[in-house]
Image (cartoon, rainbow, N blue to C red):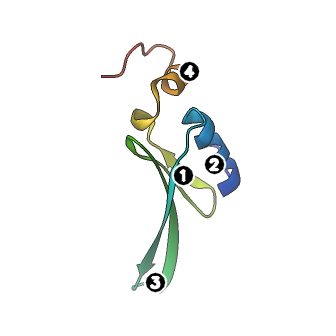
Amino acid sequence: MKKFTRKQFESHLFQLNDKRPMIYRKHNDFNYETNSNTILHLYYNGLGHIGTWQRGGNYHIFDERLPLTSYRQENPIIKEKV
């Protein structure tokens, strides 16, 4: 899996979301055992949570919540999402 900077990830996700506005939230997760903090950058559209990015370039995209046109372009064998 290719690693993205946060800006690259946001641009990629914006394209997959058919250039529609996204909601952004930041979640701070503190691990008391290791005394470390992880920040998760969360992105949403009208269908729900569409992607998460964290420092180091790790990310996950939830294809099932992307608009149909983007989803079909990325997965041409799929004709309809139900």
The CA span between labels 2 and 4 is 18 Å
For mark 4, give the secondary structure. Answer: helix
Q: Amino acid at mark 3?
A: Thr
Please give the label number shown on residue 59: 1
Q: Is residue 54 left or right of residue 62?
A: right
The CA span between labels 1 and 4 is 20 Å
The CA span between labels 2 and 1 is 8 Å
Q: Is residue 15 left or right of residue 79?
A: right
Q: Pick whichever of labels 2 and 4 is earlier in the sequence.
A: 2
Q: Pick whichever of labels 2 and 1 is earlier in the sequence.
A: 2
Residue 5 seen in the current view: no
Question: Residue placed at 63% from the left, 48% from the top?
Answer: 9
Question: Residue placed at 64% from the left, 41% from the top?
Answer: 12
- Mark 1 crowdedness (10 Å alpha carbons): few <14, some 14-19, many ≥20: many
Question: Residue placed at 63% from the left, 56% from the top?
Answer: 57
Please give the label number shown on residue 9: 2
Question: Which of label 2 and label 1 is nearer to you?
Answer: 2
Question: Residue placed at 50% from the left, 21% from the top?
Answer: 75
Please give the label number shown on residue 73: 4
For mark 2, give the secondary structure. Answer: helix
Q: Percent x, y for residue 41?
A: 53, 61
- Quarter of the image with the N terminus is top right
